[in-house]
Amino acid sequence: MHSLPVFIRLADTPVILIGAGEAAQAKQRLIERAGGLPVAPDDAQAGQARLAFIALEDEAAAQAAAVWLKARGILVNVVDRPALCDFTTPAIVDRAPVLIAVGTGGASAGLAKAIRQRIEQLLPARLGTLATALQNARGALRARWSDARARRLALDAAFAPGGRLDPLADLPPEAVAGWLAAADDPPRTRTETIRLTSADPDDLTLRAARLLGEADRIIHPAAVPAPILHRARADAERIMRGTDQTTPPAPGLTVILTMAQEQSPS
């Protein structure tokens, strides 16, 4: 990754905005939409700011403003000048409280926009309602599955394509309550093997990509390329093995990766 994607809470927080015109107005709308307070650098509240947007057409003026603000410990975004940016703003898909950000590191805002528009077509309008219902059901979820791993496995099964809480389905508001009442306990131990035929992560099947995203642990030979391992959850355990090594079953989902030239471990 070229950047660390994060979501920053800006409610009632001053954000410095330098510039005028259409670009500055767009940044002002973005700040206000996130609940922030756009302020000028000489405003009394500017001393509390930790983020700044610079929308100046003059290259030298934009660079000087960026240097000045960075010296004050403020992270800056300089419109159309990614080399000067500490952070960039993504194209946003808003299904509050669900937010999906698409960024290109400043390479092409147009490409990010095109991807956002495709995602907009996929996601139902009531996706935010599902997220809110899940938030309200946290207590019931913990009561139903006190073990965190069992809870996550149950949710993984519910969120799977065609599952009771499939996020791409236009679910009614009562879907979460209905699922909680009918849900079975997820399997405690499960092992799946994926045979890789290519070092390119784009060649993964949909099933393989889904399993990697759900796995509690990944068992793999050293030859598996890092870009494929990056498709797994960040908190999934990675276990490197020799081709002749066996691993005992463990709770949750274990995914064993093998290369095309090797045999699946027994």
Image: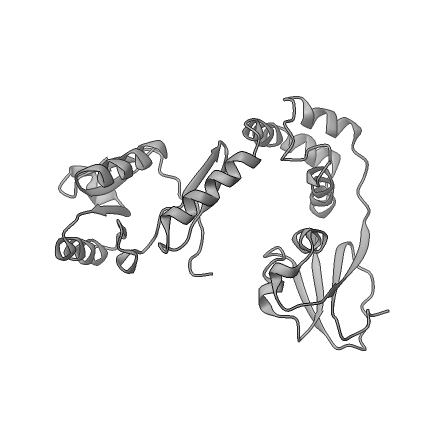
Q: Quadrant of residue 84?
A: bottom left
Q: Is 125 on the left or on the right of 168, as rendered?
A: left
Residue 62 lies, with reference to residue 265, above or below; the image says above
Residue at 47 percent across and 45 percent down: it is: 115
Q: Quadrant of residue 224?
A: bottom right
Residue at 80 percent across and 57 percent down: it is: 191
Residue at 16 percent across and 39 percent down: it is: 20
Measured as percent of width and height from the top left, residue 238 is found at 66, 65
Measured as percent of width and height from the top left, residue 124 is found at 57, 30
Q: Is 109 on the left or on the right of 153, as rendered?
A: left
- The quarter of the rendered structure image containing the C terminus is bottom right
Q: Residue furthest right?
A: 266
Residue at 71 percent across and 67 percent down: it is: 197
Measured as percent of width and height from the top left, residue 210 is found at 68, 51
Measured as percent of width and height from the top left, residue 154 is found at 74, 41
Q: Which of 243/206 is in front?
A: 206
Residue 148 lies, with reference to residue 231, above or below; the image says above
Q: Is 187 on the left or on the right of 57, as rendered?
A: right
Residue 179 lies, with reference to residue 44, above or below; the image says above
Q: Quadrant of residue 225?
A: bottom right
